[in-house]
Amino acid sequence: MNVGLEHYLTVSGLLFALGLFGVIVRRNVLVMYMCLELMLNAANLALVAFSRFTNNLNGQVFVFFIITVAAAEVAVGLALIVALYRKKQTAHVEELTTMKL
Amino acid sequence: MPFTDILFFVFAALALICAGLVILNRNPVTSAMFLVLTIVSLAGLFVLLNAFFLAAIQILVYAGAVMVLFLFVVMLLDLKTEQRQKIKLFGIIGGVISVGAVIAIFLRSLYVTKPGAELAKAEAVGDTVSLGKMLFSSYVLPFEIVSVLLLVAMVGVILLSKKELK
């Protein structure tokens, strides 16, 4: 048995599912954010695998841009979480209900 | 079984186990550490896929910069008191159902399409030279836009973390 594209795609899908499960189950904003990063990384793995098995470097350039944008996104998101914590003194999503009617 | 295949299974198992431990751990600092391990094993998978530049970037940017930021914020917020949160049963049931649906759809589509398993001969190697040539020839405009985006993010973060928003 040779390791092929489907093996990498399976790992990527399972990783994405784990990230989704974490976002749904965990109630801590920071851990939910880490699980979002897991899902981003799963997408990156799928892109790199496709790029390898179709002999095309465009996918890897795309992953490069995803990593850059993810770094910017993490910085902004963490600043938002810190600002929220300063205001509410909690990082628990069920207590952040300011927008509830 | 070739050596690279064994490496694939080792890295894949490591990535999935550490991803599971990110979710299961109650302490956010331990979660962050397991996320670092996941990212490093994904970098190993990138090396197996001939994406050497991306593997280096993954470790430098993700395991280095992003995770330091995460740990910094976790320790800044002092989340020790929130360790003992009970996980709700409803959340677990909903999570299992939705994640099971996602996995079922995914495996079903993978089984139906059967992507070509043959490994193409490695002509496109993602080393720094070839990726750099692509970035500065056909992808110059997105590259410059991303640099502006980073500047915008930096200004936004500084504004957000000021003491009083005006």
Image (tube, rainbow, N blue to C red):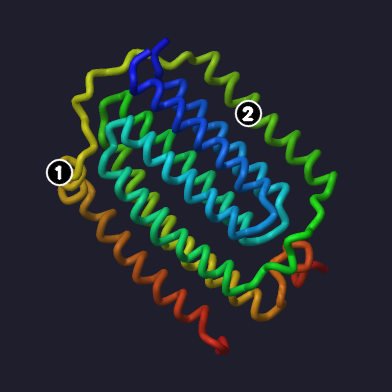
In the rendered image, which residue does mark 1 sit on?
Answer: B129
In the rendered image, which residue does mark 2 sit on?
Answer: B103
Quadrant the N terminus of chain B occupies: top left
Q: Left or right? Give the position of A52 relative to A1.
A: left
B123, above or below B116, in the image: below
Q: Left or right? Give the position of A82 relative to B82.
A: left
Q: Left or right? Give the position of A67 relative to B74.
A: left
Q: Secondary structure at mark 1?
A: helix
Task: Give the chain letter at badge 2.
Answer: B
Residue B110: percent from the left, percent from the top?
Answer: 53, 19
Q: Are there few (<14), some (14-19), or many (20+) residues within 10 Å of tag 2?
A: some
**Kind of residue at disc 1:** Val
Instruction: Give the spatial CA distance, label 2 vs label 1.
Output: 37 Å
Q: Image point 62% across, 44% down: which residue?
A: B21
Can you name the residue that lies furthest to the top here? A1
Task: Give the chain letter at badge 1.
Answer: B
**Which residue is nearer to you in this view: B2 or A71?**
B2
Residue A63: percent from the left, percent from the top?
Answer: 36, 44
**Kind of residue at disc 2:** Ile
Residue B113: percent from the left, percent from the top?
Answer: 49, 15
